[in-house]
Amino acid sequence: MSQPMPNNAVNPAPNTLTNSGNKLNPDLQQAIEQASAPNLTQSERVQKLLASVTAPILQVYAREHNACNNVDPRIVAIQDFQKSPGYKDFKAIVENTLKQLDAIANSSPHHGQKTDRFQRFGKEVFVQVTGNQRSRFGTSQADLFEQSCPDANRLLRMHTFAKKRPDLVARGGVENARACITELSQRLDVCGPGLVQHFDEAVKTIRQLTFVPSMPERIEALRIQIVRNAITEFLNRPGAACKTITSEVHQVAAWQNHFSSMFDLPSIQDVYANANFTENESEQVELASKLSALQSGSVISTMLANQILEEAQDIWNQAKAVGINDLSQYCMTLLEKINERHGQVEPHTLMQLDDDGMPGGIQNDPTLLALSILERTDQASGVHFVKESLLKWTPSHQNAYNNISLKSRGKLNWLETAPPPGSTENPEVDLISAEGMSRQQVTELLDALFTPESHELDVRRAIHEVMQNDWGQTWPAIKSKTYDESRPEDVFVNLAFGMTHDQKLGPCDLKTKFNKLMTKALENFEQSTVLDQYTENEILELLEYVTDWNTRCEQPQDRVDLTRLLTAVRYNHQTSKIPLYKAVHRHEWKHNYDLSFRKSYEPAQIRGKGTTHALAYIEAMADGAPHLLGRTLRRNAPALTDPKVVFKFIEMGANLYTIPREGANALERLIGNRNDDFVRALLEGLVQRKYSIKDIASASSIQALRTRGMTKTSAYLDRFCDNRPLIPSRCLKPTPIYLNYVGDIDHIAVFNENRGLRDVRDFIALRSSR
């Protein structure tokens, strides 16, 4: 596209893009007319538009002066170029171009204060080079003359064409070009090589957004951009060496050049892209692995498919915002807009179609569109995918009208149905689903879950997608469950929860394999990653479902062994799965009360656990045996170390002041704890929560605390001690109180109007005096 310029001139005459009255100059007018010719592809159109943009070649000057050993040949080339007859015209064209680019950037509706950044760049790039004077860009000034200045002309030509011929560019071409030019104007305060890359990226971006490229061109451009984004993310990873924004662009260029041959990437001419940036071998291996995983056709086509679907959803949202709510009426308009931007797109890959072929919404699964993109680009020249295998699973139960197979490529999975015998049609491709399978085929697929090593296709990932596609309508939560390749057994966990929602796989009732599937799921509960995406109540519901199943089973061999999981979780004080831990204890309080009651007497239930587990245990007890909260708190009070445990007891309903049949109440036993910091923090928390501690703030109590070395606690209690004899309880003024009698004196809770607690003995005294 760029043509070498004559040695003795840059352009024979000034070639400004517009003349007075906003008329196009003859050169640009001719370029627009040639690019507007009918029957041109978008690629041919943009090539004709940019073909007349010429660029100087400064190397010819350097070759003539290669004998100058004491001066950089590129500096000599710049000097001689600036003395050449065509330099003045070249400068005039570029300065006029930069002025118009500033005008475009300032015309953006979201642009702030008007600026002249492009023109400031022009002043810097056209600094006259002499024996003692240099541009701030050094030798890179030559690159700016050869690449960035012509690129500025290309940007302006594409914007002008989009403005003059909006019918021949993508919808919103002018706005997209202006936005890109505005963004570029804010990225000019960098070094020469950085500017070269920024201008080059801007040209490519406007070309992509304004002149719809062919799908192979689009996919290849996306592939390269994915590489650059991955390199940038790698450079900014936590723990990486600190890098300035200015140096980042050169390091990205260095890494791209390093992997250019391995991944068929274009090399970047950047004098600051030092090979030292890429000399770390461990970084080479790590980044090569990351890039390789992003270079497959399935990954890149899925990314592009997601972009197209997001754009389609935006278009549909805009239509609904102006009162258009029937997609069946708007679908052709939507298709036209997408086709203008991305080429021909099949309706069923873009929209969800019902049995009658009517659209019901935008596709939320990119698989079909990604497969369509792959079909158009896989064998195209100029597209460089990392090779990946096509895998297949075919059930043994087949018939002429239901000859199906599951296929996968990378992370793309789909269902393919062969045409009937004698038909010349292509196989039908659809999202992977059990709806189109027979009961025998689904049963065979479920059996394959238990022998995954016998199949080339990842049947567990396939079943995961079947669940999402088939159950998404009736059980929307399954759509959010992710598939962890490191924990493929999680598919059994999702199937188990699906059974609690009475889900089926096509014509197959999962309860026919309930014991086998549920047992496998429970075996993986403690190591599962997907279990973290379920709530405590959902886990409890599953445990209740299994318990009910076992109750209804007449044959022992049909029952599911739940005891192993319950026992393992009950005694696992280190588990990170708190929802599972709470659900198990809640289940045990309901179905195994006697055992749970005995375990509540064991100090390990509260003292031996971390705070998180202790809080979870208290919440489970509050659900299953709230009347035991106060007793458990009193029993464990002397050994507690975290006030949050006490406050959780109180929050769940434990009473600090309840009088036990014998011994001290909970508050008195807590004060007896020998951990000074714990008791002091506890008392402060009680006061903040409006609880009364005056009854324990007597002079004798404080002295006893000092004797035990509890200096912090005694000093704090001293604030509440008035050193006066206690007033007899029966002389207190009656206060409105509320009594909740559960069964015996242990379960009495007394509350005053201010929601503070009073000693129940005062309540009894008041009742006696009446």
Image (tube, rainbow, N blue to C red):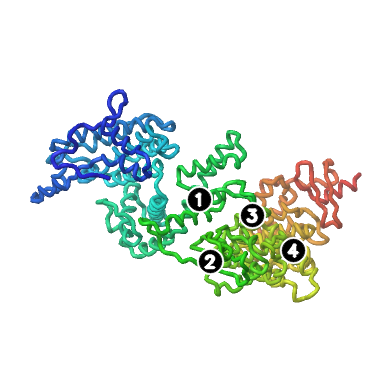
Read off the residue under disc 3. Answer: 472
Q: Which residue is mark 4?
A: 545
Q: Which of the labelled discs sits on residue 486, or is there none?
A: 2
Whether residue 740 sits left or right of residue 521 in the image: it is right
Which comes before the other along the chain, label 3 or label 2?
3
Work out how far the residue at label 3 is from the one at label 2, CA to CA, in angstroms: 24 Å
The mark that comes first in sequence, 3 or 4, is 3
- Mark yes or no: residue 678 visible: no
Q: Amino acid at mark 4?
A: Tyr
Q: CA distance from mark 4 to mark 2?
A: 28 Å
Residue where numbered disc 1 is placed = 306
- Which x, y percent locates residue 373? 46, 54
Which numbered disc, 2 or 1, marks the residue that appears first in the sequence? 1
Tell me how far mark 2 sits from mark 1, CA to CA.
Answer: 25 Å
Image location of residue 86, percent across then percent down: 16, 36
Amino acid type for the residue under numbered disc 1: Asn
